[in-house]
Image (cartoon, helix red, strand yellow):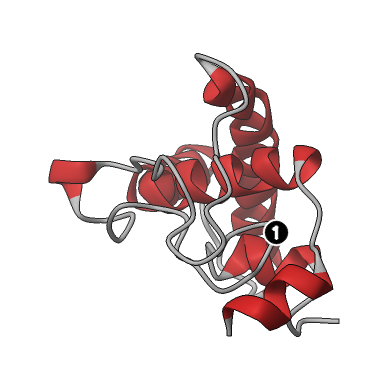
Amino acid sequence: MFGKGSKLYSILFLKCPRCHEGEFLEAHPYKLSNFNKVKQHCPKCNLKYSIEPSFYYGSMYVSYGVGVAVAIAVFVLTLIFGLDLSILEVFGSIVVVLVLAMPWIAAVSKSIWANFFFSYDKEIAEKVK
C-alpha cells in the first residue's frame, strides 16, 4: 500500500510519479530560497513534469482541500486529547499549524496534482534503478 508503485508513495515521499526514483522538487519544501520549485524533468527517467505552462496552478485547489483536512485534524485532535480550549484558542492553534505546515502542504499538493496526470510505469522504474 505504501511501497513503490503506489500513488501514496510518490505523494508522501515527493518522488517522480512515473518511476518513483527521482526527486520531484528542487529542494526540501522548507528551504525557502527554492520554495516548492518543481524540477523540469525527472533526473532518473527524464519525465517532463510540466505538461503545459502554468500546469501547477491547478494544485491550488488540491492545496485548499489538504489545508481543510489539516485544519479538521487539528480540531479533532483537540477534542480527542480533551483540551479545554476556547473557540479563539482552537482557531489560533489551527492557524499556527496551517502556517507552519504551509510549505509541506504546497509540496504535497503539487505532488498530488502531478499524480492525477502521470501514472507509475513498472518497466521504466526497473530500467532506472
Q: Badge 1: few (under 14), some or many (20 or more) residues near its Cα, within 10 Å? A: many
The foreground one among 116 and 98 is 116
> Which residue does the image show at 33% across and 54% down from the upper left?
29
Residue 78 visible in image: no
Q: Is residue 10 above or below residue 112?
A: below
- Reading the image, the residue beneath label 1 is 18
The secondary element bearing badge 1 is classed as loop
In the image, farthest residue toward the right: 1
Q: Quadrant of residue 52?
A: top right
Q: How many marks?
A: 1
The foreground one among 97 and 16 is 16
Quick check: 43 left or right of 126? left
> Which residue does the image show at 13% across and 43% down from the upper left?
33
Q: Is residue 30 above or below residue 10?
A: above
Q: Quadrant of the N terminus?
A: bottom right
Please state the horizontal and vertical placement of residue 90, each as a whole percent of the image: 51, 47
Residue 16 visible in image: yes
Please state the horizontal and vertical placement of residue 67, each as a whole percent of the image: 59, 40
In the image, farthest residue toward the left: 33
> Which residue does the image show at 41% across and 40% down from the upper left?
40
In the image, farthest residue toward the top: 53
Q: Quadrant of the C terminus?
A: bottom right
> Which residue does the image show at 47% across and 55% down from the upper left?
24
Quick check: 81 left or right of 98? right
Residue type indicated by callout 1: Arg
The foreground one among 28 and 103 is 28
